Amino acid sequence: MRTLLELLRIIFIFLLLGGLGWAIIENIYTINEAIEGYSWLGALAILVLLFVLYRNKLQFSGWYQGDGREKLPRNVSITLILTSIMLFIAPFILGSLLS
C-alpha cells in the first residue's frame, strides 16, 4: 500500500510542479513561431529537473521506506542539471538556426 501511495505522490508532484513550471516558461517560448516548435525541449528540461529534485530531496519525505532510497551521485546531479539548462536554451538556438 505504501508503494501505491508513493507512486500516486510522484504522479501528483510531477503533474503539479511540471504544470507550474510549464506555465512559467510557456510564455517565453511563444515569443517566436520558430522557437515555439521546439518548446517540447523545455518541457523535457522540466521533467529532468523534477527527477533530480525527487531523487535528491523529495523521496526521503514520502511514504515508501524500502531499500534503494539514496541520493543521486553529485556528478550525475550536476550533469543532469546542466543538460536541463541546455534543453531550456536549445529552442532559441534551434529556432534561430533552422528558421
Image (cartoon, helix red, strand yellow):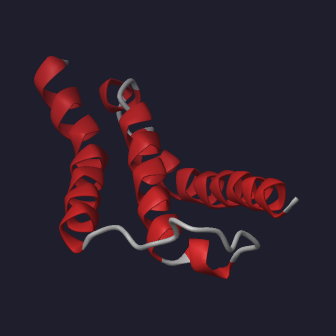
Q: For residue 30, which quarter of the picture?
A: top left
Q: Position of residue 22 (x, y in %)?
A: 55, 50
Q: Nearer the viewer, residue 57 or 20?
A: 57
Residue extending furthest toward the right: 1
* Depth check, front residue: 93 or 57: 57
Image point (82%, 53%), residue name: 4
Please indicate whether residue 86 sits to the left or right of residue 23 in the image: left
In the rendered image, the quadrant that contains the N terminus is: bottom right
Estimate the x, y position of residue 55 in percent, counting from the top left.
48, 66
Q: How many numbered discs, if any?
A: 0
Q: Nearer the viewer, residue 75 or 94?
A: 75
Q: Is residue 50 left or right of residue 97?
A: right
Q: Can the viewer see residue 22?
A: yes
Give the residue furthest to the left. Answer: 97
Q: Is residue 77 above or below residue 95?
A: below
Give x and y (percent) for residue 25. 47, 53
**Above or below: residue 61 compared with residue 6:** below
The C terminus sits in image quarter:
top left
Horizontal arrangement in the rendering, residue 69 relative to residue 9 (left or right): left
Residue, far top = 99
Q: Nearer the viewer, residue 33 or 7?
A: 7
Residue visible at 43% across and 32% down in the picture: 40
Residue 39 visible in the current orientation: no
| Residue that lies at the very extreme toward the front in this rendered image | 67
* Residue occupying image coordinates x 19% and y 29%: 94
**Residue in the picture at 35% in, 28% down:** 38
Q: Position of residue 91 (x, y in %)?
A: 27, 36
Question: Left or right: 32 with respect to 43?
Answer: left
- 68 shown above or below 7: below
